[in-house]
Amino acid sequence: MAKTNYREHDFLTMNAMQPPNHEKEHANFEYYDLHCPEGKIELVDGRVIVGNSLDGSRLLFDHILRGWSLDAATALGSIELWIAALREVYGPITDLDDETTRGEWSAPDVTSGGEGPDAGHRRVREHLSMSFFEVGEELGGEALGRIVMRLANNGFTPDTMFFKNAGQNTLHEYYLEGPAEMVIEAVRPAHRDYDDRVKRNYYARGGVAEYLIVDPERRHFEFLRLVNGSYVAQHSDSAGLYRPSSILGLAIQTEYLWPKGKYLGTRDEHRPFIVEQSQWAGKRKPPIDDGLSGGDLPFERHLDLQSVPIKFEEYISWSPEAKFEFWDGRIQISGEEGVRNTTGLLLATLGLVEACHFAPLEAWLAALRRRCDREAHDQDIRADWRKRATKAAELLRAKYHLERIAITGSLLSPKPLSFWSQPALAVWGVSFEQMQQIYKEVSAMNIDVFEADDHWFQQRLNTDEFRLEDL
């Protein structure tokens, strides 16, 4: 089998330069529309759990492979490790050009990881989140949803939680350290067990004082109070009010847990959270900025044949916002870096042996051959990229009179270029409007561009993930 030449695929734009396959893109969208995991990425016992189940993690991995190609995965980890994984799944392999006929491959069915029917989940979740947020400060804390709550080495993203940012919990920029005073989860029918049983156990062990489970489909709710390390079911009084022991001054009107109308924000909407006694101290306590944040650690995901435990520090630094969107014929997760990071975390969670079941042997071998070809032509590609970056810098300097432009990113990395590599420039002294125009022009040349003073970019300089070379 002839090996791929990097010039035929133009390594720097391997995805963008390929002619669109509308039939495949349509099939990818149909799969996304029917089978997409819920937008949650949590860390549980060292594994990334997507959409409330390990099958959700498998499903998201499947989406990435379908839309971004197997190259997105084989770019991470060593070639030797991938070959070892393939041998465990498919038997002896002589080399990457092995054309030995194998048995018929069957794709794993991971659609059970989809979010399933909504059954009122979103409407109730938003109703409770907005209602609690309105009274959070008056109760002496904050009520927020979908931020990470760290319990030991686990990271959960409750639908809504109330915390005081004092005592047993501390709010950092990207996560809450320690158990919230109260957590609320709105149940989806397909993942009822995860909220009812799994999270109940973790929240109890982690010290969450009050846990409210709301099931929109069954129109059922359960108040749980932590007593001596275990949850004990609680009941509302004769007026239908429940008063959490961990939040002084709060009463919850149980009949108002369900939204009144079809639309949020109406003036006559039910208000389930009642402030009976204000605890407002006159000033909100700001987050402490000494915690971990996205990009604090350079992305170097260790992989192995089997699952490799993920540390909380790695999770909070690499995991993107759990917003699963679709364009360009494939799933999107907070940009290309978000997809790359998610791919690495999922490979660590599943292990390379399980990952190899997601495509036939010949497809994996072809992806590895493409990687070998890129690495063999690394210096040629770098020279081509440098010429392209220099030309782009000359254009920007002439058109926008920029005083400083530098090469950054993959070109200056000592690591071999990969599927996820891209030539990049950093620019200084530009307005927001100029940056928008610069981005359009440079993107058309298949080059990334960063505003050098941006906080995100500075983080990567601080971790040595990015370097600078002035042009």
Image: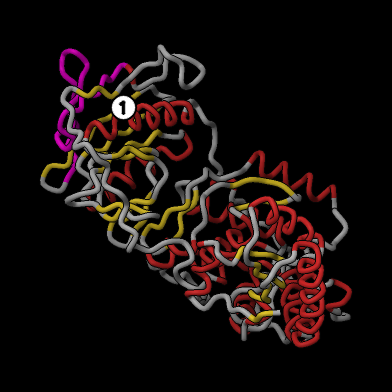
Q: Give the range drawn in magenta.
A: 230-255
Image quarter where the C terminus lies is: bottom right
Residue 357, how many percent across, how many down? Answer: 63, 64
Q: Can residue 11 be spotted in the picture? A: no
Q: Name the residue under label 1.
A: 221
Q: Quadrant of residue 245?
A: top left
Q: Is residue 209 visible?
A: yes
> Relative to residue 446, is residue 236 depicted above or below?
above
Residue 94: percent from the left, percent from the top?
Answer: 72, 87
Q: Which amino acid does label 1 sit on?
A: Phe
Q: Where is residue 437 in the image (x, y as percent from the top left)?
A: 74, 54
The residue positioned 78% from the left and 77% from the top of the image is 390
Residue shown at 22% from the left, 42% from the top: 181
Q: Is mark 1 on a helix, strand or loop?
A: strand
Please tell me how crowded label 1 is: few (under 14), some (14-19), or many (20+) other residues with Cα within 10 Å. Answer: some
Q: Is residue 350 magenta?
A: no
Q: Position of residue 335 (x, y in %)?
A: 63, 56
Q: Which of 347 and 276 is in front in this view?
A: 276
**At 34% across and 24% down in the image, what residue appears?**
220
Q: Splitting the image into 4 quarters, where does residue 394 fall?
A: bottom right
Q: Residue at x 64, y 52 (%)?
A: 432
